[in-house]
Image: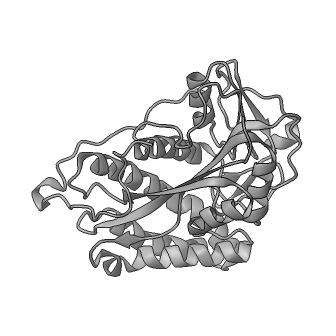
Amino acid sequence: MSSDVPRVDPPIAAAADADLYSDEDYASGSNISSTTSLSSSILHYQYQNGRRYHAYRQGAYVIPNDEREQDRLDLNHHLCTLALSGELYRAPISDNTERVLDIGTGTGLWAIDMADQFPDAKIIGTDLSPIQPSWVPPNCVFEIDDFELEWNFTEPFDFIHARGIEGSVKDFPQLFRQARKNLRPGGWFEVMEPTVGIFSDDDSVSQAPHLSEWKDKLIEASVKFGKEMGVAKDYKKWMVEAGLKNVKEEIYKVPFSPWAKDAKLKEMGRFQQANMLEALDAYSLALFTRFLGWTVEEIQMLLVGVRKELMDRKLHIFSKYYMVCGQREGTP
């Protein structure tokens, strides 16, 4: 595994004040993507508070699936790839990988990029929503499915991947056991999680009370929903308990804004700031109204303060992205 990825251990150096506001804006890259045949019922979306939600297994997921959220997912794909120094994964999978599964594929960009990188492999992406593109590599297919249900694939996989699944899983140990069960001997399971949390190497967290309150309320609401956020720190333990071996954990610091001196971290901060500013509504509306009893007006009042803190580059706050992978025993 390459060593140029920003890890969680060293403190991040902040840029000088004169450099804080001298950056050009970055635009997220354009999309490519998927085909699947669907029944019309899957397209009977639910609308609430100005956002659109999935129809299949309605209520199983509380994040919107509308164009705003799709754009954010595409941006987050770029951010995760940037965190991994341009790589799509960290597990030491074989160049001869034949079958890959991406659960909770979202807009499908990771699966599409994998299909391009492994043209002889079959890449399957599953999601509750049919929001993937209509044109994809011939070796990439998308299916509407709920990865919390029993998997019914006819063949095992060489590599199973997931990203950003906190808040959508009731029973992580069961999910990890199911992933192991569906791996070929020697196959790998990897999860990358932009987990909920606010950190700093100085006292910046204490100067971001609105962001801290939002994080705490988000976790509280997710617990009441039955799909707790903020649990990525346990992924390594759960993989070991599921029977996977050679389990590895890497943690990356991702600044919430472009405050860092390091050029790569500064760029990651630009994308994370844009990602977070768009994620606030997406993550708050359904969870806070359905499980905390908040009104939309109360939510927006809190988010005004959160946005102000996210835009303040003098707050040296960052999130932690977990990458955890493990291998099924046996020889490929």
Task: Determine the residue positioned at 39% across, 71% down.
Answer: 199
- Residue farthest to the front? 331
Location of residue 281 in the rendering, given as x and y in whole percent from the top left corner: 54, 61
Q: Check the picture and name the quadrant holding the N terminus.
A: top left
Q: Is residue 65 above or below residue 281?
A: above
Residue 101 showing in the rendered view? no
The answer to which quarter of the image holds residue 171 is bottom right
Residue 156 showing in the rendered view? yes
Location of residue 272 in the rendering, given as x and y in whole percent from the top left corner: 40, 53
Location of residue 95 in the rendering, given as x and y in whole percent from the top left corner: 59, 26
Query: Residue 308 or 196: which is nearer the viewer?
Result: 196
20 horizontally vs 64: left or right? left
The answer to which quarter of the image holds residue 144 is top right
The answer to which quarter of the image holds residue 286 is bottom right
144 horizontally vs 102: left or right? right
Query: Residue 56 or 66: which is nearer the viewer?
Result: 56
Task: Determine the residue positioned at 58% across, 36% down.
Answer: 110
Query: Residue 159 or 139: which is nearer the viewer?
Result: 159
Query: Residue 187 or 36: which is nearer the viewer?
Result: 187
Location of residue 304 in the rendering, given as x and y in whole percent from the top left corner: 41, 70
Q: How many marks?
A: 0
Task: Determine the residue positioned at 25% across, 57% down.
Answer: 260
Q: Is residue 186 above or below residue 305?
A: above
Q: Check the picture and name the quadrant holding the C terminus.
A: top right
- The coloring applied to the image is one colour
